Image (cartoon, grey):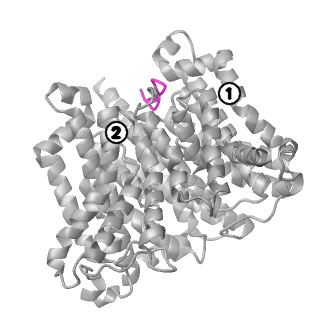
Amino acid sequence: MMLLAFLTQTIRIAMPYLFASAGGVLSERSGLIALGLEGYMLTGAFCAALGSYYGHTPWAGVAAGVAGGAAFALLYALCSIRYKADQVVVGVAINLLAVGLTRFFLRFIFGSSSNSPRVPGFSVAETGSGFLALTHNPLIWLGASSIPIVAWVLYRTPFGLRIRAVGEHPGAALSVGVPVERVRWLAVTLSGAIAGMGGVYLALDQQQFSDQMTAGRGFIALAAIIFGRWDPRRIGLACLLFAAAETFQIRLQGISRIPTQFIEMIPYVLTIIALAGVVGRAVPPAALGKADE
Amino acid sequence: MLPPIVALLIAALVGDVLIITYGQSPGAVYRLLLEGTWGNAYGLGQVLYKTTTLTFTGLSVAIGLRAGLFNIGAESQLAAGGFLAAIIGTWLPAGLPSVLALPVFILAAAIGGGAVGGAAGVLKARWGAHEVITTIMLNFIVLALLNYLVVAHFKVFDTLHTSDIRTGALPRLSDMMAMFHGSAANVVLFLALAAVAVAWWYLFRSRAGYELRATGLQPQAAEYGGVNVPRVWWQAMLISGAVAGVGGLNFVLGYKHYYEDGFATGAGFLGIAVALVGRNNPVGVVVAALLFATLSQGGLAVNALVPKQMVEVLQAVVIIAVATSVPEVRRVLRSVRKDRAA
């Protein structure tokens, strides 16, 4: 029973990471750094609360959240693909913009600086907290399938081949007639939509939006992408590993002598170790960050 | 100079839209923003206080960018510098004159920030780990570590800050000019201006600075010219981190006289904006720091009319607009020149 409860909690915690990193890997494999994942998620979460509140059904929230994440990704694509702006700068700014805009509209629409009112969602309260209850939350199914679907798209479809081609060698792709910019626009927009679902999951699980509720999860997802060496299967495992560490920490609170801050560091430390090539080499897509050439 | 002006116009336009959305008049909001910052001495003092921190983090990012390195970790470097200085300050003998204490504090803050920046530099120079990712990851790691150290070992009961430093507190501007009364502006501002001068000399007049800029422009060419590129990388990150670290003194020596969890929040990301708008030029950094400090403080001033978060939106829009308009304006200018030549 202990194990099942542990597994249940791990899966719940892993959901936002799975969505965000599934989106992020599409962007990164097409050559665009996914620094804005945190921003896509936060916008997704806010729009989900908004949609669910006014649409009176969580599905309206899902649609709005996906649209919100995609809209922010479109802004990123516009700046970095169309206008060749520095991806790192724009990525950082996208996150700041998401924090600012969600706070502004939180006050404008809901008149609060901390959280939205309660909205319809798929929360533990409605579906129960057990392992079987997981199956009643459609977002869990979506999240669990996000990584396999992205893996299938990347490795088994012509579109995925094109994404990988423009991320490795845009010049070669262009020379055989691949519309490099269009593929990148699509990959980035999709990444925003899927990462937005990570925020949707959070908002509908907690049945409200609260200020900065993504709390750095977008960066953990980015860490999972790098730790997973840009391969969806490994990324999925990395998400589960990070989530398990978090669950472990929550379960052991009060009993464990390891301070929580050290458990929090695990994803980041592992990412640095992976990036430094201590255990095998983490090689990013060759054209990552170079859309301006 | 054109791109920053274009960017400011775009930001003002977005600001107008938000203000009108909120049912207020842009003119009234902008007037209030100016009155609350440059219109009175207290506001100006607060702007100068924020300018000081942003000058340090902006310089930090600019030095990195001149070497071709993107330091996203200024926030944790600032925090680490402030933390180490504050801890050293609680150990120094109480009677130590400020003249002797100040160099110790500067060194401590530089070591704190430099260690974090230098770690990213070594990871890049030795193992090729990209500094953008490692500095982001180090932000989380270092801030968690500092949080642990404060909570578990150094905090004053029931707070999230350390005990006061025993010596070396620096005077506020209000001690000299009464009109600044109540504002946090302090003489670390002059330390920031000195850092700007030193950074300018280092970048544009010293041999090491020349090698740093050569590496930033074209590492292969620099290598061919005899520059030890990996060494430039780790040294640049070390210096970049150290500069951000010294910025911690603004809070620790000039304002609160202790380290408090979260004092650095946001200053690193704004440092990127400051370096970007200041075109990675030390003097430009000061101007840009003034701009972003004015916006930060201005947000508090207009809060009665529109949510202060509007200012966060404007800051992000300025960053995006500058990043986007710089290459675009350059391209337009180039094509205009080409037309003329033809």
- Can residue B280 be seen in this snapshot? no
Q: Which mark is residue A172?
A: none
Provide the secondary structure element on which disc 1 rests: helix
Closest to the observer: B9 or B148? Answer: B148
Closest to the observer: A246 or B132? Answer: A246
Circle 1 is placed at which residue position? Answer: A150
The magenta span reads A284-293
Residue appearing at x 34%, y 33% in the figure: B127
Majority secondary structure of the magenta segment? loop
Residue A123, percent across and down?
A: 82, 54
Rounded to the nearest angstrom, the CA distance separating label 1 from label 2 is 31 Å
Residue B143 quadrant = bottom left
Closest to the observer: B64 or A151? Answer: A151
Q: Amino acid at mark 2?
A: Leu
Residue A143, percent across and down?
A: 74, 38
Question: Which chain letter goes with mark 2?
Answer: B
A159 to B149, vertically: above or below: above
Quarter occupied by the C terminus of chain A: top left
Image side of residue B118 versus residue A43, left or right: left
